[in-house]
Amino acid sequence: MEEKILIIEDEEKLARFIELELEHEGYRVEKATDGRDALAMAEHGDYDLLLLDVMLPGMSGMELLRRLRRTKQTPVIMVTARDAVMDKVTGLDMGADDYITKPFEIEELLARIRAALRKRSGAAAGEGLLTSGKLTLDPARHIVRYGEEEISLTSREFDLLQALMENRSIVLRREQLLSKVWGYDYMGETNVVDVYIRYLR
Ligand code: CA
């Protein structure tokens, strides 16, 4: 099934360029140039993702997002002006899933769209994010971040970290960790856990 994306962007050349690229990738695309029209489309349509410019005629992207989130959780990628840090923070606080800064490379946009759509599939499966301080672990997308930075882990390390974060308030016994991460039939030395925990720290 083709995923349907609504591009909300008043710069028509840019919107047309993104539309062509997304169609080339196999997405179905619709466009809106005015904030109010776009909100009505987003509320009544069945889009898989919205690409939402912040600066729009009719209604700002922020206001559109705020109103949309009363009824819909459609994934939203905000398009912000360069260095508009407040826009990014406000957008994320209001429920945007991600943001991209103008001018952007189309490949980066495509990657962010794929990630947002994957995240939505994961969320649909009922798997939530785990957080601990600045550390965020996304079980659905298999991604770990420290602040903004993505951390590269092997799948064992990932599973161990997930087990630790899921049981943050409980002191896990070595054997419990082993059975969670390696499976019940693991026959190796228990000190592999120590090695991995040292590495993760
Ligand atoms: Ca604009």
Image (cartoon, rainbow, N blue to C red):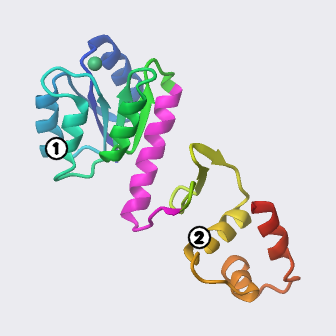
Task: Give the residue type at disc 1.
Answer: Arg
Q: Secondary structure at mark 2?
A: helix
In magenta stretch: residue 111: yes
Mark 2 closeness class: few <14, some 14–19, many ≥20 residues within 10 Å: some
Query: Which numbered disc covers residue 67?
Result: 1
Give the dominant element type of the magenta stretch: helix, strand or loop.
Answer: helix
Is 183 placed left or right of 28 in the picture? right
Query: Where does residue 76 sit, x and y in percent of width and height?
Result: 33, 41
Amino acid type, callout 2: Met
Q: Quadrant of the C terminus?
A: bottom right
Start and end of the magenta stretch? 107-131
Q: Which is nearer the N-term, disc 1 or disc 2?
A: 1
Residue 48 left/right relative to 105: left
Residue 32 at what x, y percent from top left?
19, 26
**x, y (%) of residue 54?**
29, 27
In the rendered image, residue 119 lying in the magenta stretch gets the answer yes
Q: Residue at x 44, y 53 (%)?
A: 119
